[in-house]
Image: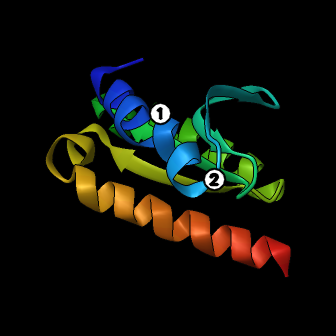
């Protein structure tokens, strides 16, 4: 795991279960892909993107992967490593909003 992935995992996602009662897993295999973080209850993936994700080939691969996950009812949230370093609270707030909305929508 990258420094940013460790920060998000240990400082927010791992304790999320204790705080909100919803669990995340890390490095989850879904189909032919490994996602950074997955919340099964919300059917939500979180991906952290380093600079290599902004190269043409990587952008194409990420788009294919996102499409595959979306086809299986999974929402993908993407944040840059810079977001984690400079806007950590805002990223956490955004994740929480999406988790809450997804769980609510899936229960309807």
- The reply to whether callout 2 and callout 1 are in contact (CB within 8 Å) is no
Q: Residue at coordinates 65% horizontally, 43% vertically from top-left?
A: 23
Rendered image: mark on residue 43? none
**Residue 55 quadrant:** top left
**Which quarter of the rendered picture does the C terminus lie within?**
bottom right
Q: Is disc 2 surrounded by few (<14), some (14 to 19) or many (20+) residues within 10 Å?
A: few
Q: Which residue is mark 2?
A: 21
* Residue furthest to the top: 1
Q: Which residue is mark 1?
A: 58
**Residue 93 quadrant:** bottom left
- Tell me, yes or no, if residue 62 can be seen here: yes
Q: Residue at coordinates 83% horizontally, 74% vertically from top-left?
A: 107
> Tag 1's secondary structure?
helix
Residue 41 lies, in percent from the top left, at 75, 54
Q: Choose between 65 and 80: the one closer to the eye.
A: 80
Q: Residue at coordinates 80% horizontally, 71% vertically from top-left?
A: 106
* 80 to 35, vertically: above or below: below
């Amino acid at each position: 795991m990258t420094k940013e992935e460790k920060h998000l995992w240990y400082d927010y996602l791992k304790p999320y279960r204790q705080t909100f009662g919803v669990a995340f897993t890390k490095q989850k295999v879904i189909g032919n892909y490994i996602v950074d973080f997955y919340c099964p209850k919300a059917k939500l993936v979180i991906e952290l993107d380093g600079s290599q994700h902004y190269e043409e080939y990587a952008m194409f691969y990420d788009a294919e992967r996102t499409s595959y996950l979306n086809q299986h009812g999974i929402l993908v949230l993407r944040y840059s490593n810079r977001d984690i370093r400079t806007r950590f609270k805002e990223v956490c707030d955004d994740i929480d909003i999406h988790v809450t909305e997804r769980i609510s929508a899936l229960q309807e």
